[in-house]
Image: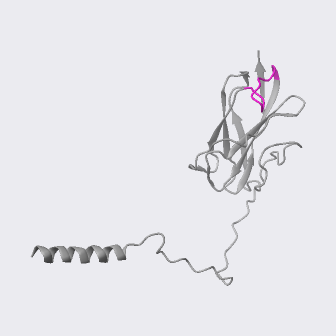
Amino acid sequence: MTLRILLTAAVLTSSLAQAQTTIFTIPALPPKSSAATPTTPAPTPTTPAPATPTTPATGSTLPMTNPMLGTAHSANLNGPGSLRAGQATTWTFTLTNQGEQAINLQHGACDVRFEVLDAAGKVVRANPTNTVCTMQLVITDVVPGETMDVQDIRWDGRDSAGKALPAGDYTIRAVFSGAGVRIMAEEFPVTIEN
């Protein structure tokens, strides 16, 4: 009787092992045919987006490949207007929906990038290209009339080489580039104090 139970168990285990589905046994989807059902394009907003900068000055290091967000909006940096060189300071990139439809962004945790310009307009702290980002997915839903925080940025008053910048007036320029769109924040003036 024990042999019979062992044989039955072996047969069931073998059958279950063969029936298991793995990523290697899932059949591929058929290719899309060119005669697919036509889709209706998304409606275009009737309210034009406010005048926000569309292209930074020559020499910018910010990503500019995605098209501008088509929904009426404004984007700003919120944070202190001054800092001391070497003092890590945080600003928040916020998005205000001024349109009539929700703005839904599914983006990465490092999709807001920034650069710092001196009083002459020269980029002194470039957009970092070696930032370690997680594969985290962030969902930002902004209903009409609402303002939401998108992401924080940090700067410590140093240039691209890590050298403390002299006291004076600077400008932080930030852009969200993710979820297939680009959103420029209003430039933010900041003063480095002694």
Residue sticking out furthest to the left: 1
Look at the image and tell me in which quarter the C terminus lies. top right
Label total for image:
0
Q: Is residue 118 left or right of residue 66?
A: right
Q: Quadrant of residue 85?
A: top right
Magenta stretch: dominant secondary structure: loop
Residue sticking out furthest to the bottom: 35
Q: Quadrant of residue 77?
A: top right
In the image, 162 versus 37, the foreground residue is: 162
Above or below: residue 29 compared with residue 101: below
Q: Residue at x 77, y 37 (%)?
A: 115
Look at the image and tell me in which quarter the N terminus lies. bottom left
Residue sticking out furthest to the front: 3
Q: Quadrant of residue 130?
A: top right
- In the rendering, at what x and y percent does residue 162 appear? 74, 28
Magenta residues span 157-168
